[in-house]
Structure formats: structure tokens, C-alpha cells
Image (cartoon, rainbow, N blue to C red):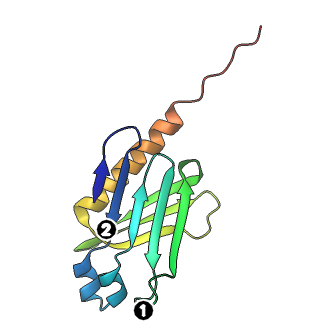
Amino acid sequence: MTEAAGAAERMEVHSSRWWALIHFSVTRWLFPQRMIADHVGISTSSIRRWFVPWERTDEHLPFSHIAEVSHIRGLIWDAISIESSGGLNPLTVRGLPKSHARYFVDHVRERINTSVAAPPPQQQRR
């Protein structure tokens, strides 16, 4: 997990290589799946096949379109699923270390709550 301080705070979490090894996933072992939260929204980066790493799927979901942040807890590793308000194609990352997943979900929920709690200032009519 990576976090940068400042106005453009960015947090990144990626799947565990041990999880990939146990699940016999060479692709996830070489190229862990990543989920990134920055000041704009949530992004994922995923490579499906190890022998064609240039074929990558990048998805982005702005904070204004996030409907639900799910933290799926497992025995050893966790998963995060972020659903859009449209309900189609959630952003999901599996095989995350428990503490990293919990911290990431808490951070995203806090950021969503602060963006909803502070409505934009309205101009007064005269």
C-alpha cells in the first residue's frame, strides 16, 4: 500500500503475490492487480494474461458515481468491490492483505462522506 501526503493524496493497494502463488496465477504473481484512490476517484489496473502484458484494462470511477464500497473479508486475504450508481461492472480487487484492505476502505469511505457532507456554497440572490 502506498500513500502520498498533500492536497493530491493518492493511496494504492495491490493484490498479494502469496495469494497469487497459492491460487496458481502466474499473471497475478508477475503483475498484481492494483486499486488506486486519488482526489478524483477510484481506478483499477489489471493485466489478464502474462504473455501479453501490453493488453491492460484500466477502469476509473469518480467519487460522485460511487454507490457502495464493499469490504469482503476472508480468512487470510480480503477483497474490495466498489459499485457504481449505475450498478454495472463493479471495480473489484481480490487477494489483498487484511490491514491494507481495511485502511483503504476506511480512507475511501471517509473521503466519500466528506465530499457529501460539504455541499457547494450557494450564491445569494438580491
Say which quadrant the C terminus sits in.
top right
Q: What is the CA distance from the residue labelled 1 to the residue labelled 2? A: 31 Å
Q: Residue at x 34, y 55 (%)?
A: 104
Q: Which mark is residue 114?
A: none
Task: Classify residue 10 as left or right of residue 57.
Answer: left
- Give x and y (percent) for residue 16: 27, 74
Q: Image check: 55 left or right of 36?
A: right
Q: Position of residue 42 (x, y in %)?
A: 48, 57
Please tell me in which quadrant of the rendered image residue 77 appears: bottom left
* Corner quadrant of residue 36: bottom left
Question: What kind of residue is marked 1?
Answer: Phe
Taking the spot 30% from the left edge, 92% from the top edge, the residue there is: 24
The tag on residue 73 is 2
Horizontal relation, residue 27 to residue 17: left or right: right
Q: Secondary structure at mark 1?
A: loop
Q: Compare marks 1 and 2 and give the one earlier in the sequence.
A: 1
User: Residue 51, which numbered label?
Assistant: 1
The answer to whether residue 83 is above or below residue 29 is above
Residue 15: percent from the left, percent from the top? 32, 72
